[in-house]
Image (tube, rainbow, N blue to C red):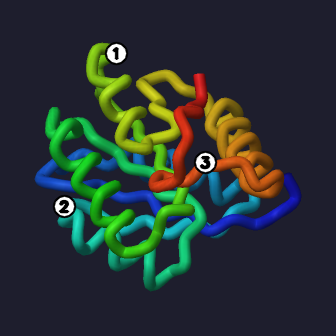
Amino acid sequence: MDERLRIIIAKPGLDGHDRGAKVVARALRDAGHEVIYTGLRRTPEEIVRTVIDEDADFLGLSSLSGAHNFLIPKIVELLKHSDCNDVIVFAGGIIPEHDRNNLYSKGVRAIFGPGTSSTQMSEFIDSAAKRRLESLPVGCGEDSDWHWD
């Protein structure tokens, strides 16, 4: 896509490892998007406030601490309660396969694990942005079961 999108990359909770999040932020920036990295140890409320303040199109959440089943749904719920239903949420890090369907059901549209290429992430961003342009539901609070495989 030729559209420059606003993407927030965030590290929720007490996870102190952010190398992957920084690599993702750089790759998406290199792909032509405006990327804001929130830094380490952000609360769900801080992350949602950043999404609102920056008028973000996408929110990428990096989780390596094992708290993904609590923190990610909490953030999605806060987005919905803040009328940010159109924000497209994706996640990355160490998220086991058996936890993914639950996160998809909460509104997460993609989950990227170790070894994911920047090309795959860009293809997801392009696909989700195209769905939005076609008025297909893709945001975290929109009625859709679509997610990136």
Binning the other alpha carbons within 10 Å of mark 3 as few (below 14), some (14 to 19) or many (20 upward) gives: many
Residue under label 2:
41
- 1 or 3: mark nearer the eye: 3
Considering the image in quadrants, where does the C terminus appear? top right
At label 2, the amino acid type is Arg
Taking the image as shown, residue 17 lies to the left or right of residue 7, namely: left
Which amino acid is tagged 1? Glu
Q: CA distance from mark 1 to mark 2?
A: 24 Å
Residue corresponding to mark 1: 97
User: How far apart in space, not on screen, are marks 3 and 2 (Cα)?
Assistant: 27 Å
Q: Position of residue 76 (x, y in %)?
A: 34, 55
- Asked if residue 134 lies left or right of residue 7, the reply is right
Secondary structure under badge 1?
helix
Q: Residue furthest bottom?
A: 53
Tell me residue 14's x, y (percent): 12, 53
* Number of residues whose C-alpha sits closer than 10 Å to that of mark 2, classed few (under 14), some (14–19) or many (20 or more): some
Residue that label 3 marks: 138
Asked whether disc 1 touches disc 3, contact meaning CB atoms under 8 Å apart, the reply is no
Q: Residue furthest left?
A: 14
Say which element carries label 2. Answer: loop
Q: Residue 62 is drawn in which quadrant?
A: top left
- The numbered mark, 1 or 2, whose residue comes first in the sequence reads 2
Q: Residue at x 47, y 52 (%)?
A: 140
Of residues 114 and 3, the one drawn nearer to the viewer in this rendering: 3
Residue 141 appears in the picture as rendered: yes
Task: Give x and y (percent) for residue 105.
Answer: 38, 34
Q: Is residue 119 left or right of residue 89?
A: right
| Residue 31 in sight in this render | no
Disc 3 marks which amino acid? Val
Marks 1 and 3, Cα distance to the nearest angstrom? 21 Å
Q: At 34% from the left edge and 15% from the top edge, which residue is drawn?
A: 97
Q: Tell me: residue 30, above or below residue 125.
A: below
